[in-house]
Image: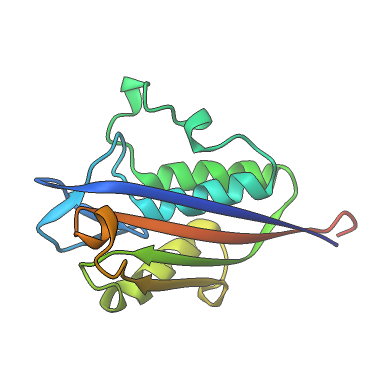
Amino acid sequence: MSFRIGTGYDIHRLKKGRPLWLGGVQIPFEKGLDGHSDADVLLHAITDALLGAAALPDIGHYFPPSNPSIKGIASSVMLAKAIQEVHRLGYHVANVDSVLIAEAPKIAPFRDAMRKAIARLLQVPVSSVQIKGKTNEGLGDVGKGEAIAAQAVVLLTHDPHP
């Protein structure tokens, strides 16, 4: 059995008038993340981690922000494409560990729903998905409450002799 590790990172500014999507769940909040898609930073970080672990091009290759036909695309669609590509190569997700970095909203009340949504998208048990919430201690755009960031690490397995 072989193993592959990938990392992902994303950050988006908060903007009034947009829904806030984090981990495939709509979160009640006065601002949402600004981006070409629904700007779900957690799903974007996980998507890039998956693609990186499989040595595939990054999220922008599959979903270029310059393409007007995908304006407003759900990040869950992007993650579904990434997992399809990973499975096509014979890899399977062993686990995902991630961090959402935000001053607000608090992540804890939504963690279980996000873990379930991500596990469903990745076709893995919920026990294979972890999400931690952190603040930026008032530092930078995230610390000022102007942005939300996410980091993710993914472990893929490949059994050449199933």
- Furthest toward the right, the residue is 161
Counting from the top left corner in percent of width and height, residue 102 is at: 28, 64
* Position of the C terminus by quadrant: bottom right
Asked whether, in this view, residue 14 is left or right of residue 66, the answer is left
Give residue 46's position: percent from left, percent from top: 50, 54
| Colour mapping used in the image | rainbow
Name the residue: 55% across, 37% down.
58
> Which residue is pictured at 19% across the width and 59% down the height?
145
**Residue visible at 35% across and 72% down in the picture:** 134
Q: Is residue 75 left or right of residue 83?
A: left
- Identify whether 38 is placed above or below 119: above
x 13%, y 53%: residue: 31
Image coords of residue 84 (percent x, y): 59, 44
Pick the quarter of the image with the N terminus: bottom right
Q: Nearer the viewer, residue 25 or 64?
A: 64
Q: How many marks?
A: 0
State whether residue 29 is above or below residue 89: below
Residue 116 appears in which quarter of the rendering? bottom left
* 42 displayed left or right of 33: right
What is the x, y in percent for residue 19?
A: 17, 51
The answer to whether residue 90 is above or below residue 152 is above
